[in-house]
């Protein structure tokens, strides 16, 4: 069973996150009004929905970091009804408004991360107590994952190889209790097993491609040994 991989190299992760965010913003700034409201790869979501989700995620991640630094209780995640309402309202905005929101929320998060001097306080993510250093990795995963969802021609092969190794570890942590078939993984950086069952898939590939397959953002054709199995979308 996969577990959290340990101390995250925050400086590296922050650098990868910064580069990934700039790349995403460089794409979205060129979108037309029509393109903003075209479907993304997420069922029922336009690109505007994806952008709104990314911006609100940045706000929430920043609130976790700022609370930990100040010694305050971790803020709860907004309830599902509020999230849905904010998502729909946000997705109705113009392209300029969406771009400003993406940019400003990412900038505020950047400032919060750069102000941290101690990454050891404990926070709770996905039901597990983890060091604060896991939070930038969580955001890195969001940025890369939703860049794929924007359906702009960006693929897993465009992910920084060093970043991909950590994205994969984060995904394995997220999938530690998921209802999946038994899968034996062999990548450039690790060997691991997830899922349950007697018949085990033996899947091989690059860190980035296996990450994309495990998160449901790529089909079985991008890896070896998946036997046509497409996995569900990981949020």
Image (cartoon, grey):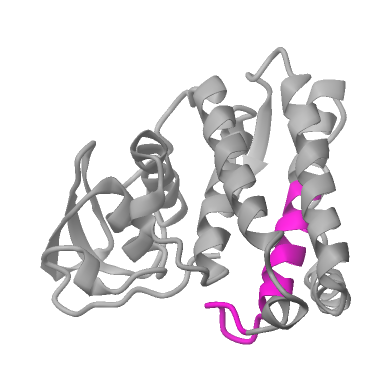
Residue 152 is at least partly visible in this image: yes
Residue drawn at 63 percent across, 44 percent down: 22
Farthest residue in the top direction? 117
Residue drawn at 45 percent across, 67 percent down: 153
**In this rendering, position of residue 149 left or right of residue 170:** right
Q: Residue 148, image x and y in percent?
A: 49, 64
Q: Is residue 135 magenta?
A: no
**In this rendering, position of residue 174 left or right of residue 14:** left
Q: Residue 20, image x and y in percent?
A: 56, 44
Quadrant of the rendered structure where residue 6 is?
Answer: top left
**Magenta segment boundaries in residue numbering:** 39-59
Vertical comparison of 129 with 122: above or below:
below
**In this rendering, position of residue 175 left or right of residue 130:** left
Q: Nearer the viewer, residue 97 or 145?
A: 97
Residue drawn at 37 percent across, 60 percent down: 212
Residue drawn at 63 percent across, 19 percent down: 120
Vertical comparison of 185 with 150: above or below:
above
Q: Nearer the viewer, residue 229 or 19?
A: 19
**In this rendering, position of residue 179 left or right of residue 61:** left
Chief SS of the magenta region: helix
Q: Residue 124, image x and y in percent?
A: 65, 41
Residue 74 is at least partly visible in this image: no
Vertical comparison of 235 with 102: above or below:
below
Vertical comparison of 91 with 110: above or below:
below
Q: Residue 63, image x and y in percent?
A: 83, 40
């Amino acid at each position: 069973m996969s577990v959290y991989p340990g101390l995250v190299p925050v400086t590296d992760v922050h650098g990868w996150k910064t580069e990934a965010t700039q790349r995403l913003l460089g794409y979205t700034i060129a979108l037309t009004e029509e393109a903003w409201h075209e479907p993304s790869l997420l069922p029922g979501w336009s690109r505007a929905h994806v952008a709104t989700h990314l911006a609100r995620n940045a706000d929430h991640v920043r609130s976790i970091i700022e609370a930990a630094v100040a010694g305050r209780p971790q803020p709860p995640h907004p309830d599902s009804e509020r999230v849905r309402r904010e998502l729909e309202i946000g997705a109705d905005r113009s392209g300029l408004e969406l771009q400003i929101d993406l940019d400003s929320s990412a900038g505020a998060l950047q400032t919060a991360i750069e102000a941290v001097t101690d990454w050891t306080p404990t926070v709770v993510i996905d039901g597990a107590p983890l060091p604060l250093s896991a939070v930038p990795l969580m955001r890195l995963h969001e940025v890369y994952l939703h860049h794929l969802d924007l359906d702009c021609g960006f693929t897993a092969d465009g992910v920084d190889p060093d970043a991909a190794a950590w994205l994969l570890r984060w995904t394995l942590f997220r999938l530690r209790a998921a209802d999946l078939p038994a899968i034996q993984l062999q990548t450039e950086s690790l060997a691991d097993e997830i899922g349950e069952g007697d018949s085990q898939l033996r899947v091989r590939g690059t860190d980035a491609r296996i990450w994309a397959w495990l998160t449901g953002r790529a089909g079985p054709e991008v890896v070896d040994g998946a036997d046509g199995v497409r996995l569900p979308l990981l949020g």
